[in-house]
Image: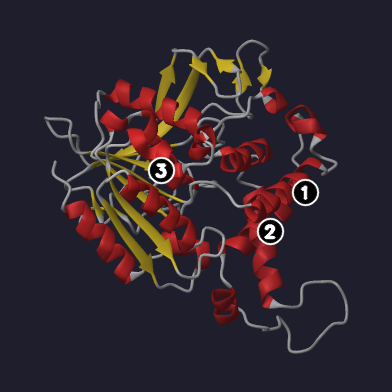
Amino acid sequence: MQDSTSVGIVTPQYVQIDKPLQLKSGASLDSYHLVYETYGRLNAARSNAVLICHALSGSHHVAGYYADNEKGIGWWDNMVGPGKPIDTNRFFVIGVNNLGGCHGSTGPASIDPQTGKHYGASFPIVTVEDWVEAQANLAEHLGIEQFAAVVGGSLGGMQAMQWTLDYPEKVRHALVVAAASKLTAQNIAFNDVARQAIMTDQEFYGGNFYAYDTLPRRGLRLARMLGHITYLSDDSMAAKFGRSLRKNELSFGFDVEFEIESYLRYQGDKFADLFDANSYLRMTKALDYFDPAAAYDGNLSAAFRTAKADFLIVSFTSDWRFSPERSREIVKALLDNELNVSYAEITSSHGHDSFLMETPHYHQLVRAYMENIAV
């Protein structure tokens, strides 16, 4: 029996953008394609569109499942669907795989039309600003002049913020969840260690591993294991794994002994077979580079002077990677500009991954906010 709160079977859609995209790095793409999914219906006034921006390892597959894989449920399926906090009975929801990704949009694993080979290492660095411009081109293709809301968690929340700066007239509400206006030095350090794990893998071949019919699995596996540790909290790891052993005694060796080791290696192995290493490098660099206040001598309040949207900012108590303090900095900058801001600090033990969890208070909050958005 089909779940009445699921959007059900979904089908990815593709759009070719033949409009040149000038990237922040100085490089440019003459054309590119984006893969996206939509849920719900666009109303006659085209006023009920909601854009969901994904985090580092996310994709366009936000909700529902594919006809040939019912277990491949969208990464935010608990949030998006009929009667869910982002209700597809009211809203036309769009999920898009970002440029430089590895789930169908033009990226390092794509074929460069000029060479007939994989872009590989030649694919340019992309930034949050570049993604927002590409998303704006998708909105134009769909005939959407203004979003009712732009929503995202983590790196997705950074995109939601950037939308309000680059296209202040095109977004009425921004929901920024478990995000920050810039990474701390510690976060940049974690990202660099992850990149070094990939780039020093013997199978990386300077980013052109496609030509050698191989993958830098070892490096990508280590990068994911490191990242996964930072997404969890000490309490959640203790509650789920503690110091439990896979067997009842110590082996006095270096094979997997603790359940947490088994879990991390499983997550690393699974990720290494699904995600492109070059995309991972570029996604983490986009995180590092995001800093809208940089152009204003570090003054975040000045950076938000052009914003006009209403905001919901959400943080989680156990998120030590994007701590509540970072969210409060955003709230202050918005209030300094007399913008309408709602802020919630949700008690959760799940760490940074809390934004993906079905925590009742969190979901009730998002539901209440979305219900008050006029369409």
Which of disc 2 and disc 3 is earlier in sequence? Answer: 2
Which of disc 1 and disc 3 is earlier in sequence? Answer: 1
Q: For marks 3 and 1, give the CA distance.
A: 37 Å
In terms of secondary structure, where does tag 1 sit?
helix
Q: For marks 3 and 2, give the CA distance.
A: 33 Å
Disc 1, disc 2: CB below 8 Å? yes
Q: From the top left corner, tell me how far across and down residue 357 is, in percent.
A: 41, 64
Quadrant of image for the C terminus: top left
Q: Which residue type does callout 1 highlight?
A: Ala
Residue 54 visible in the current orientation: no
In terms of secondary structure, where does tag 2 sit?
helix
Residue labelled with disc 3: 301
The residue under the point 77% across, 72% down is: 256
Quadrant of image for the N terminus: bottom left
In terms of secondary structure, where does tag 3 sit?
helix
Eyeballing the image, is 305 above or below 70?
A: above
Q: Nearer the viewer, mark 3 or mark 1?
A: 3
The residue under the point 66% across, 49% down is: 188
Q: Nearer the viewer, mark 3 or mark 2?
A: 3
Residue labelled with disc 2: 226
Residue 288 visible in the current orientation: yes
Residue labelled with disc 1: 197
Which of disc 2 and disc 1 is earlier in sequence? Answer: 1
Q: Horizontal placement of 299 versus 273: left or right?
A: left
Q: Which residue type does callout 3 highlight?
A: Ser
- Neighbor class of circle 3 (other Cα within 10 Å; few <14, some 14-19, many 20+) is some
* Nearer to me, 210 or 351: 351
Q: Horizontal placement of 203 versus 100: left or right?
A: right
